[in-house]
């Protein structure tokens, strides 16, 4: 166990917030977890795990023992009559994993290309983009239960997946995801439900679809390497049809449960806040749902700007925006 005191996390979170962990340790194998938990207990500290840091708002000092998830490995782990099963370690970079599957002739994840973060974080918020959610291709995952200290397998039905939601997000800290297995269809055709992808023929090459997805992302979203951000900062609010009726001009997406999903980005833009900023934090001028760090921001700056956006949207539309990234 290699413990590092006052570990700088500024480069470990895609928002680029100034942050340091009181104590940190890299996790390269599941066997290290029990000893790390003991160490945290002995010091009276919380234990928390950080993946790619792409969906978190970090405090300036994280008063915890932070486990930096680095478990590696990816492989074809099984085959059924209809699917290839692929398994990756929680510390693998998500986009590299997607590229690897497509490169090996196992498409199915191409719409989720370019999403920052790790494989282990993907089920936590049930990542989704361009008409596909992780839960659509999920098979199972393996996780260390910090309460019982056992390694358990979770099937899709055990994960409580919803829109940007899972049991792992609802009960933070309980489970440390170790590896994730996805089921990719052997008989593949592109998912083209999203504007910009609908023109693909059913026999399109998966790599071409992936290239289009990456181009779409690039045209809409800032690259965190040059402008710190955590992707969408708020959920798209899901409201009743009556509520949606009041917002006649708003883009509306009817949901299977009869409710209507609105576009938080549209609501924010209508409040005149696209490209707005308070100090070092603002909305991206190309997409109002993305909060960006123009440089040197801390959690406080993010909290102040996020509260300002929420208040303006509430006052104008009566809609409560819910923050997507997790506070650590
Ligand atoms: N819109 C505006 N103004 C803006 C931004 C968006 O009017 O500044 C409108 C668009 O014109 C469009 C609608 O809002 O009519 C939806 O916008 P977009 O297609 O860009 O998608 P989104 O709903 O803002 C969601 C996900 C993204 C994902 C995209 C593509 C959430 C919270 N966000 O964004 O996920 O990439 O769809 O599928 O569901 C993320 O979670 O971090 C993320 C980037």
Image (tube, rainbow, N blue to C red):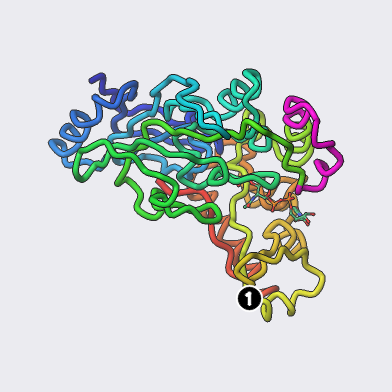
Provide residue 66's location: percent of width, then percent of height.
33, 34
Specify the farthest residue to the front.
81
- Reply above or below: 317 against 109: below
**Bounds of the magenta span?**
193-211
Quadrant containing the C terminus in the rendered view? top left
Asked if 125 appears above or below 143 in the picture, the reply is below
Which of 48/304 is in front? 48
Which residue is painted at 24% across and 25% down in the image? 32
Magenta residues: mostly which secondary structure? loop
Residue at image mark 1: 240
Seen in the picture, residue 261 relative to 303 is either above or below; the reply is below
Rendered residue at 44%/47% (across/down): 156
| Residue 262 in the figure: left or right of residue 251 | left
Q: Position of residue 237 (x, y in %)?
A: 62, 64
Is ligand 1 closer than 8 angstroms to the Cβ of mark 1?
Answer: no
Decide: is 143 above or below 315.
above
**Residue that sits furthest to the left in the current view:** 42
Circle 1 sits in a helix, a strand or a loop, which is it?
A: loop
| Front residue of 157 and 116 | 157
Find residue 100 and report its image quarter: top right
- Quarter holding the N terminus is top left
């Amino acid at each position: 166990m290699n413990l590092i005191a006052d570990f700088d996390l500024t480069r470990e979170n895609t928002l680029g917030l100034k942050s340091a962990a009181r104590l940190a340790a890299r996790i390269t194998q599941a066997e290290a977890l029990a000893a790390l938990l003991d160490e945290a207990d002995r010091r009276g500290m919380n234990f928390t795990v950080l993946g790619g840091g792409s969906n978190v708002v970090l405090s300036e000092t994280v008063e915890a023992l932070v486990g930096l998830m680095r478990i590696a490995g990816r492989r074809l782990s099984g085959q059924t009559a209809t699917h290839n099963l692929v398994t990756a370690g929680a510390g693998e970079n998500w986009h590299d994993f997607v590229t690897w599957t497509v490169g090996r002739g196992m498409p199915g994840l191409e719409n989720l290309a370019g999403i920052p973060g790790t494989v282990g974080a993907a089920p936590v918020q049930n990542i989704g983009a361009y008409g596909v959610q992780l839960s659509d291709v999920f098979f199972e995952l393996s996780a260390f239960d910090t309460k019982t200290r056992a390694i358990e397998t979770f099937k899709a039905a055990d994960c409580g997946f919803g829109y940007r939601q899972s049991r792992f997000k609802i009960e933070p800290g309980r489970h440390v995801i170790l590896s994730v297995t996805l089921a990719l269809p052997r008989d593949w055709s592109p998912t083209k439900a999203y504007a910009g992808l609908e023109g693909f023929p059913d026999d399109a090459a998966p790599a071409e679809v992936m290239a289009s997805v990456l181009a779409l992302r690039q045209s809409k979203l800032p690259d965190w390497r040059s402008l710190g951000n955590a992707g969408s900062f708020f959920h798209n609010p899901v409201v009743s049809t009556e509520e949606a009726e009041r917002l006649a001009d708003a883009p509306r997406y009817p949901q299977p449960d009869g409710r209507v999903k609105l576009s938080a980005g549209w609501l924010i833009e209508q409040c005149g806040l696209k490209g707005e900023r308070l100090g070092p934090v603002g909305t991206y001028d190309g997409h109002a749902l993305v909060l960006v760090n123009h440089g040197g921001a801390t959690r406080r700056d993010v909290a102040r700007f996020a509260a300002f956006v929420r208040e303006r949207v509430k006052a104008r539309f009566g809609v409560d925006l819910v923050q997507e990234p997790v506070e650590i």
